[in-house]
Image (spheres, helix red, strand yellow):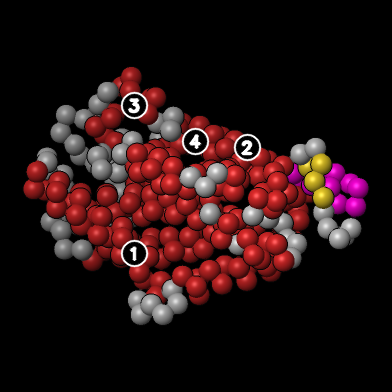
């Protein structure tokens, strides 16, 4: 019992030495084999006895893309290649949403394991991020294939395939940092209050409509004063940047084209890192309190 870490004053204490956040990160790094095993376990459990396997992760967003595209074509203004633009951001949104929901529930879902053995508890939200990132990579490959083969009037790829497509990598890193920060914070709150998960689902549903997914960001750009405030939302910036990395600006009547939002990407990077730092510190300072509540 004396060999187990204790908690005091907001820092983990091991052998009487206060552990700083940097030392916590080093400890997480030492547990890389455990992280790999937990990721493999999550993948096996999630797709056990499912014929479609990991391909089922593509089904919900594809159904959303199909439904929304039909609604837009039938009742709203026609937008050329709308499904292509929608697909790009829909998969990224699903990744962000799943990361937050899975991370927020990671402590409770792994309560039995956490009570049995010691390991840095911060690996649990991280494992959910890695698992969902693997799903997202598959959806990204599917999206790229769609751009090459879909029978549309104006071909997208290879004409519009440029080296800037590599920018999807830093965008994915940015979204991962942002979602992990929220995940750490919500994982802590979810162990204290049972209704946090349901509140999170509700807020994510509302947040969805505040992002440039159902509507093109060009509609927002047509209102200069609103656009600058709108793009301070880091997730809105990451979605626009991801879309512009893969596709040219969308032609919307009466609205200016929106190119790669470089300045806002810098702001989004700083704010995403700040949210991660805040969430991680809160999680680390409260991890033994969480263990008492599990």
Question: At which x and y percent is residue 258?
Answer: 31, 35
Q: Earlier in the sequence, mark 3 or mark 1?
A: 1
Q: Name which of mark 2 and mark 1 comes first in the sequence.
A: 1
Question: Bounds of the magenta span?
Answer: 12-22
Q: Which mark is residue 227?
A: 3
Q: Is residue 107 left or right of residue 145?
A: right
Q: Earlier in the sequence, mark 4 or mark 1?
A: 1
State the count of labels: 4
- Residue 159 visible in the shown view: no
Q: Can you say which quadrant of the picture contains the N terminus?
A: bottom right
Q: Nearer the viewer, mark 4 or mark 1?
A: 1
Looking at the picture, tell me which residue is in the foreground, 206 or 238.
206
Q: Position of residue 71 (x, y in %)?
A: 14, 48
Circle 4 residues within 10 Å: few <14, some 14–19, many ≥20: many
* 8 drawn magenta: no
- Nearer-N-terminus badge (2/4): 4
Query: Cα distance, mark 2 to mark 4?
Result: 15 Å
For residue 110, side relative to residue 169 (left or right): right
Instruction: Sort mark 1 into few (<14), some (14-19) or many (20+) by Cα contacts within 10 Å.
Output: some
Q: At numbered mark 4, what does the secondary structure look like: helix, strand or loop?
A: helix
Residue identifier under label 1: 58
Label at residue 278:
2
- Of mark 3 and mark 2, the one earlier in the sequence is 3
Label 4 sits on residue: 268
């Amino acid at each position: 019992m004396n060999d187990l870490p204790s908690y005091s004053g907001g820092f983990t204490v091991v052998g009487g030495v206060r552990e700083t956040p940097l030392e916590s990160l080093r400890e997480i790094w030492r547990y890389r084999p455990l992280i790999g095993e937990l990721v493999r376990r999550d993948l096996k459990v999630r797709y056990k006895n499912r014929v479609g396997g990991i391909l089922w992760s593509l089904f919900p967003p594809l159904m959303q893309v199909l439904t929304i595209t039909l609604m837009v074509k039938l009742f709203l203004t026609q937008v050329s290649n709308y499904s292509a633009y929608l697909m790009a951001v829909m998969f990224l949104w699903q990744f962000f949403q799943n990361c937050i929901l899975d991370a927020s529930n990671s402590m409770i879902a792994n309560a039995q394991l956490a009570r049995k053995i010691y390991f840095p508890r911060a690996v649990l939200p991280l494992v959910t991020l890695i698992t969902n990132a693997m799903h997202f990579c598959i959806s990204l490959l599917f999206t790229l294939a769609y751009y090459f083969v879909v029978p549309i009037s104006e071909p997208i790829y290879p004409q519009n395939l440029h080296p800037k497509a590599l920018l999807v990598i830093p965008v994915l890193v940015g979204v991962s940092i942002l979602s992990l920060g929220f995940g750490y914070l919500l994982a802590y709150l979810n162990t204290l209050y049972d209704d946090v998960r349901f509140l999170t689902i509700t807020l994510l549903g509302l947040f969805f409509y505040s992002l440039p997914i159902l509507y093109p960001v060009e509609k927002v750009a047509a209102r200069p004063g609103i656009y600058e405030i709108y793009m301070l939302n880091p997730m809105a910036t990451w979605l626009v940047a991801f879309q512009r990395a893969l596709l040219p600006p969308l032609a919307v009547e009466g609205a200016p084209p929106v190119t790669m939002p470089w300045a806002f990407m810098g702001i989004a990077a700083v704010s995403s890192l700040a949210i991660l730092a805040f969430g991680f510190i809160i999680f680390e300072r409260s991890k033994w309190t969480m263990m008492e509540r599990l």
